[in-house]
Amino acid sequence: MKNRFHLTRALFILTAMLLISVNNVTAEPLLKPTFNTLFKPLLADPMEPKIAILPWFEKRHLQLDIGSSVDLYQNDNNNFAAGVDFATWSLLNRSENFKFPVDAIDYLFGINASWKKPVSIGALPFDELSGKIRLSHISAHFEDGHYDATTSQWLQTDCPLKIPFTYSREFVNLVIALSSPQHRVYAGYQYLYHTIPDGINPHSFQAGVELSTPGNTFLAADFKLLPIWQASLSETRGYRGTWNMQAGMRLKSIGLEKVRITCNYFSGMSRHGMYFYRPESFTTAGIIVDL
């Protein structure tokens, strides 16, 4: 609870600082919210704020993401920005009569700062160095799709903890990228400074690549090293590689530059907090919108 108070206070202080500019009526407004963020969304990161509808191939599940990153401030040189992140990602069950009971849902909010600068790195095909640091809170919950109404009980399934349980994490995440107009590579690090349940390794690592291919198509891959939960020890031990590989097309030809049709293959530790202990593998296809 104390850590949540500190995060809320940080969000309030940032917003207050950005609002100070209204005291000078002759100056340009400092707050100019824009979805055209300085640091572009990571295409294949499953936890990137976005709007997405992605049915699973193997099971009657549906991923539904609702969220976005917004830059509240960008400087005149367009090389520094500060903003906010809001996101939910849900796992829905596809049932009869067009019903989609929610099995699990995660909520994220936080603040961020990003920057970029031109670079020249010999023969490497990159001309820009950029970065983004985020301070975020995430919580996760089981919903009606994980509840048996006939017995009035939660579905325990393979969960090592008694359901319901509290899942909450606060973390700092840093991503550094090298990019050109057509391609990008990046690396990241995340530090958890508060977790419920505890016993979670605070360190995780990330890397990825994005390649533009002919006809507004692209290939992207996101790789993470995530801690593995050991139920017998009630803590994490070791890491597991977690991949999300994506191929898709941007709908630029019909004026929808920020809309992507994609196919994804995921393998590794579940992105859903309620399933933080579970490795899984599946394929999805659908639509992603980067606001």
Image: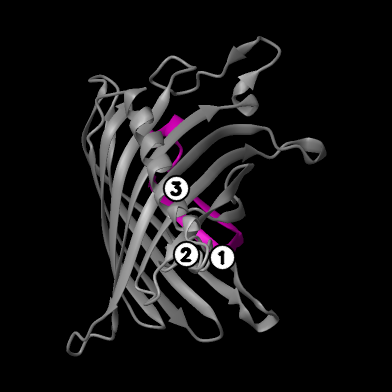
Which sits earlier in the primary sequence, circle 1 or circle 2?
2
Residue on which disc 1 sits: 262
- Answer few, some or many: residues within 10 Å of disc 3's Cα (few below 14, many 20 plus, some between 14 and 19): some
Q: In this view, does 239 lie to the left or right of 110?
A: left
C-alpha gap between disc 1 and disc 2: 7 Å
Q: Residue at x 53, y 78 (%)?
A: 217
Q: Residue at x 29, y 45 (%)?
A: 172
Which sits earlier in the primary sequence, circle 3 or circle 2?
3
Residue type marked 1: Thr
Which sits earlier in the primary sequence, circle 3 or circle 1?
3
Mark 3 touches mark 1? (CB < 8 Å): no
Single out the residue that lies furthest toward the left: 122
Q: In which quarter of the view is residue 77 placed?
A: bottom left
The label on residue 246 is 2
Report the predominant secondary structure element of the magenta stretch: strand
Q: In which quarter of the image is the C terminus?
A: bottom right
Residue stretch in magenta: 263-291
Mark 1 touches mark 2? (CB < 8 Å): yes
SS for callout 1: strand
Q: In which quarter of the view is residue 100 placed?
A: top right
